[in-house]
């Protein structure tokens, strides 16, 4: 039996759904509240053109329908192995760097693929920056405090396409006659996202679950017209722990395959990340994290398992650092 702390609720009525068309100050307050209480929310009535999303989705479907050998020849493709430390899941994925030059010369698909990916990345980047600007405003910070890190020419943001096959097509080779396939399978194990902010869109098949501070795992109902947004580790650090980098996971339970497209908005590898002085001063709080570069953080994160807590090592022991953050 599931422990109380791991209880799953079937509905996601506790997940904030933020209507981006509402009055700006209201949206910004709602975003800040969601980031502080859960670290996760959905946005609707956003500015991403549905045609741009559909084209990206179709390119993803086309890619995952290719023979495995062909997919394996594409840089960034992964089958079941997540990271380098032995984590596995019922997932195949394609990880793409979002630098314009990389996107204009993809090693799969054709010109139309390149254009679909470029347009989608631009659209979700705009959305991530808009959400981050609203976040900064809600915190009383200069509007571009966070988004300037994403807009930097050498921003290290990535797009990951995840494909979770239906339960009758498990990658592990299990068959429907196998009783265990009716149980949820781990698609993408429990983790936090390392970057600043994640903007994720999925098809109509569910599977994403988020951990609430009270210990519940809440299943997120799929809505292809919405985007799921979650706080990443770096935003937790920059807000000195005021925002929660939410733990989440994806399970496969349905007889249909799930496709998710996650844009991870990150800074340049050289960017210095640490609690923002304005946040520490405003809350009159001790500084919880030391300053580090995104390169330092990534190097350390690669040495850990997917579900490990990566932030503890960056906890502050001293209170005397005043490096310029985000430079
Ligand atoms: O597919 C999902 O809904 C979750 C994927 C995810 O958490 C990730 O790619 O980091
Ligand atoms: Fe994630």
Image: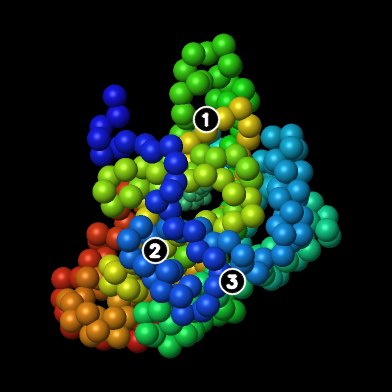
Query: Looking at the image, which residue is at 56% across and 78% down?
Result: 151
What residue is shown with label 1?
253
Residue 301 visible in the picture: no
What residue is shown with label 2?
34
Mark nearer the N terminus (2 vs 1): 2
Question: Does 124 sit above or below residue 222?
Answer: below
What residue is shown with label 3?
21
Mark nearer the N terminus (2 vs 3): 3
Q: CA distance from mark 1 to mark 3?
A: 34 Å
Tell me residue 82's x, y (percent): 48, 43
Q: Are the residues tagged 2 and 1 within 8 Å (C-beta)?
A: no
Tell me residue 153's x, y (percent): 59, 79
Q: Give the residue furthest to the top.
A: 177
Query: Looking at the image, which residue is at 29% across and 81% down?
Result: 279
Q: In the structure shown, which secondary structural element does the residue marked by tag 3 occupy?
A: loop
Q: Give the residue furthest to the right.
A: 111
Q: CA distance from mark 2 to mark 1?
A: 27 Å
Residue 241 lies in what quarter of the image?
A: bottom left
Question: Does 193 sit above or below residue 67?
Answer: below
Query: Looking at the image, which residue is at 59% across and 71% down?
Result: 21
Q: Is residue 94 left or right of residue 114?
A: left
Tell me residue 327's x, y (percent): 43, 84
Q: Nearer the viewer, mark 1 or mark 3?
A: 3
């Amino acid at each position: 039996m599931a422990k109380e702390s791991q209880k799953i609720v079937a509905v996601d009525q506790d997940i904030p759904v933020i209507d981006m068309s509402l009055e700006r100050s209201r949206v910004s307050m709602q975003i800040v509240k969601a980031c502080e209480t859960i670290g996760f929310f959905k946005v609707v009535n956003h500015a991403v053109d549905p045609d741009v999303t559909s084209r990206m989705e179709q390119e993803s479907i086309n890619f995952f329908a290719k023979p495995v050998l062909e997919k394996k020849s594409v840089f960034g493709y992964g089958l079941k192995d997540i990271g380098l430390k032995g984590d596995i899941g019922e997932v195949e994925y394609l990880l793409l760097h979002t630098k314009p030059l990389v996107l204009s010369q993809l090693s799969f698909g054709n010109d139309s693929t390149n254009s679909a990916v470029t347009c989608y990345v631009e659209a979700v980047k705009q959305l991530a920056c808009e959400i981050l600007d609203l976040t900064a405003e809600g915190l009383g910070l200069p509007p571009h405090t966070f988004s300037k890190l994403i807009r930097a020419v050498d921003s290290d943001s990535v797009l990951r396409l995840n494909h979770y096959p239906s339960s009758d097509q498990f990658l592990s080779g299990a068959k429907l006659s196998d009783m265990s396939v009716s149980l949820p399978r781990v698609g993408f194990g429990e983790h936090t996202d390392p970057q600043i902010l994640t903007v994720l869109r999925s098809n109509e098949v569910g599977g994403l679950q988020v951990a609430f501070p009270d210990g519940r795992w809440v299943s997120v109902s799929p809505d292809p017209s919405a985007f799921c947004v979650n706080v990443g580790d770096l935003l937790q650090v920059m807000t000195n722990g005021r925002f929660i980098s939410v733990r989440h996971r994806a399970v496969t339970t349905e007889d249909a395959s799930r496709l998710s497209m996650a844009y991870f908005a990150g800074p340049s590898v050289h960017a210095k990340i640490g609690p923002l002085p304005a946040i520490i001063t405003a809350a009159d709080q001790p500084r919880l994290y030391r300053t580090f570069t995104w390169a330092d953080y990534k190097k350390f994160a690669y040495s850990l398992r997917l579900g490990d807590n990566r932030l503890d090592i960056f906890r502050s022991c001293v209170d005397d650092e005043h490096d310029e953050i985000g430079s």
